Amino acid sequence: MEKITPSSYSIMRVASRADITSAMKDSLVQLLKDAVDNNFSVGFMKDSTEADFDKFWSDEIALCESENKLFLAVSENQVQGCVIVTREERANGRHRGELRKLLVHSKAQGIGIGTKLEEEATSYARQIGLTLLYLDSATNFLVNGVYEKWGWSKSGEIPQFAKNPDGELVSTWFFYKLLS
């Protein structure tokens, strides 16, 4: 992977399967693998396979044809980062959405990709009329105050919420962001 700079990537919104090239899909698989290899609690274990990651992305990409959207940071047809916005489907919660899988490849961190992805996701959430976003993040993977810098508020910590890829139980923090 060549060195990524702030001017060498762009953010794209995935609206359908046709927006994703096979190289992009492969790099999404590698992005998730990178997160697991770095022991980030992202819903997969160390024994998860590339086929597991591929199925996950196939399912998520299929959902992009609804109001759920996947945002990608792309450099030379390779995905360097991503985030998913998922709108609540139940009638009493259609005003809210979840920010999921905010990932930046370990070799592309520190140049603002996460910030740009969060900004695009938040802007989209406002465009579709959401007034509240929420997310959860394993406490041992929190970047020092980054969510708070982006305007998110901590709402609470739950111990032993999930396992990291090595199998250790970890706590998670829930955050929310009011958009109205």
Image: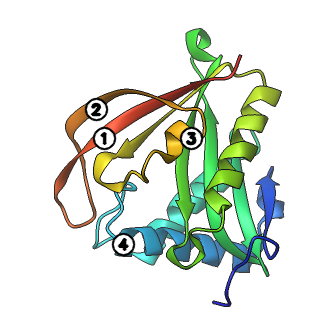
Q: Of callouts 4 and 1, which one flags the residue occurring earlier in the amino acid sequence?
A: 4
Element class at badge 1: strand
Q: Residue at x 79, y 60 (%)?
A: 11
Q: Please provide percent x and percent y for residue 41.
A: 34, 56
**Mark linked to residue 38:** 4
Element class at badge 4: loop
Q: Please provide percent x and percent y for residue 62.
A: 68, 51
Q: Of callouts 3 and 1, which one flags the residue occurring earlier in the amino acid sequence?
A: 3
> Marks 2 and 3: CB-CB under 8 Å?
no
Mark 2 burial class by Cα count in 10 Å: few <14, some 14-19, many 20+: some
> Marks 4 and 1: CB-CB under 8 Å?
no
Mark 1 highlights which residue? 172
Q: Is residue 153 above or below residue 8?
A: above
Mark 2 highlights which residue? 157
Q: Of callouts 2 and 1, which one flags the residue occurring earlier in the amino acid sequence?
A: 2
Mark 4 burial class by Cα count in 10 Å: few <14, some 14-19, many 20+: some
> Marks 3 and 1: CB-CB under 8 Å?
no
Mark 3 highlights which residue? 149
Q: Of callouts 2 and 3, which one flags the residue occurring earlier in the amino acid sequence?
A: 3
> Marks 2 and 1: CB-CB under 8 Å?
yes
* Farthest residue, direction top: 92
Element class at badge 2: strand
Q: Is residue 80 above or below residue 167?
A: below
Q: CA distance from mark 2 to mark 3?
A: 19 Å
Q: Amino acid at mark 4?
A: Asn
Of the pair 71 and 45, the residue shown nearer to us: 71
**Left or right: 89 as drawn, with respect to 67:** left
Q: Nearer the viewer, mark 3 or mark 1?
A: 3
Q: Amino acid at mark 2?
A: Glu
